[in-house]
Amino acid sequence: MPSFEPALVLPHGGKLIDRTVDGDLSARSAAAGRLPKLSLDDRSLCDVICIATGAYSPLEGFMGSADYHAVVDGMRLANRTIWPIPIVLPAEPSVARQLGKGSRAALVDGNGVIIATIDVSEIYRADHPREAKSVYGTADTAHPGVAAMLESSDTYVAGTIDLVAMPTSEFPAETMTPAQTRQKFTELGWRSIVAFQTRNPVHRAHEYLQKVALEIVDGLLLHPLVGTTKGDDIPADVRMRCYRVLLQKYYPPGRTVLSVFPAAMRYAGPREAVLHAIARKNYGCTHFIVGRDHAGVGSYYGTFDAQRIFDDIEGELGITILRFEHSFWCNICEGMATAKTCPHGKENHVALSGTKVRDMLRGGERPPQEFSRPEVADVLIDAMKAEPAPVS
């Protein structure tokens, strides 16, 4: 693992975890093939990658019951380290019964490929109703995070993992582990780095926030999440094309790094904002942008809840949170603004609903340039044309 300059922020918990396996991988994979097998759903597969590469430092595996209950009830691990969301491995009870404390199992993806091994430390039952209410703030099964949790087994397997085979990235040129981004920042001479989390194409409002942040730091890590998302979210490959053209045309060379974040979305609002901040700290970032509805979905979370959750923990967390208002184009100001800088009424602001934007794009019509860069709109129009026509 590369050595890091002391100026870079320390990983969460003080040490960057690395659970990737060195040595003869074919021999290790063959040995793992003789173990009992646990199937990974898409979210657990993303979690394995984030644990193994250190994105979820200080976790070295899937949580046991002490950490699980401490996180659900108090947003901390059992050792009192801040941690907002349970990272757990659901298993079918019939499969879990074949395992015991001290046993080892192979973790396989949907195609049966062995991805990792787990040294089982505990098997326990989850409290799904409590987990839903504490982590997601709701027990509503229409919430995508709650639904995903309830569709999974409430039998959890805990233990440290070892990554045997890294899944092939769809974006190899933009795939970097926390160790690699830290090395990249060092090579660039950056000491202050702001991260921007996104699961959507970057529109003018996002661009404005990023460039405001670039005024006070050395560089920007544009860090789109490319793990599991909702079915109606824009596919990762389309989003990546948008990011590439935007950075090429509208951002200064040498001030940005585009790298993918392999996590799954949980849509847990405020708690997920904390998880995203911790992960970016592990990637080497000193600052993290949080909007008014970070990681939200529907109307489950209040305006700015995702920012307020940091009020009492930011100092302990060790990463600076940049809290931004909703930004927009104002026709009177003739520029991007927020409620903090614009005195004009909403009737002067360019604001389009997601449905309206999708309808325009699907019809081959660019949204106004005050809302979206034309190059980004063109990528989205091409993608929309390839979609099946909506059923009326």
Image (tube, rainbow, N blue to C red):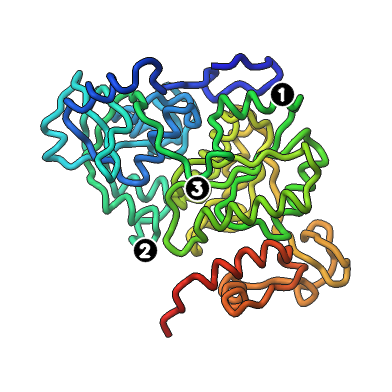
Q: Dot 1 surroundings within 10 Å: few (below 14), some, or many (20 or more)? A: few
| 17 relative to 300, above or below | above
Secondary element at image label 1: helix
Q: Disc 3 versus disc 1: distance between alpha carbons?
A: 25 Å
Secondary element at image label 2: loop
Q: Which mark is residue 142?
A: 2
x, y (%) of residue 286?
A: 68, 31
Quarter occupied by residue 219: top right
x, y (%) of residue 204?
A: 73, 60
x, y (%) of residue 171?
A: 53, 44
x, y (%) of residue 330?
A: 81, 68
Q: Disc 2 versus disc 3: distance between alpha carbons?
A: 23 Å
| 49 relative to 380, above or below | above
Name which of mark 2 and mark 1 comes first in the sequence.
2
Residue of label 3 = 226
Residue of label 1 = 187
| 289 relative to 229, above or below | above
Amino acid bearing label 2: Ala
Name which of mark 3 and mark 1 comes first in the sequence.
1
Foreground of the two, 359 or 100:
359
State the residue at coordinates (42%, 50%).
228
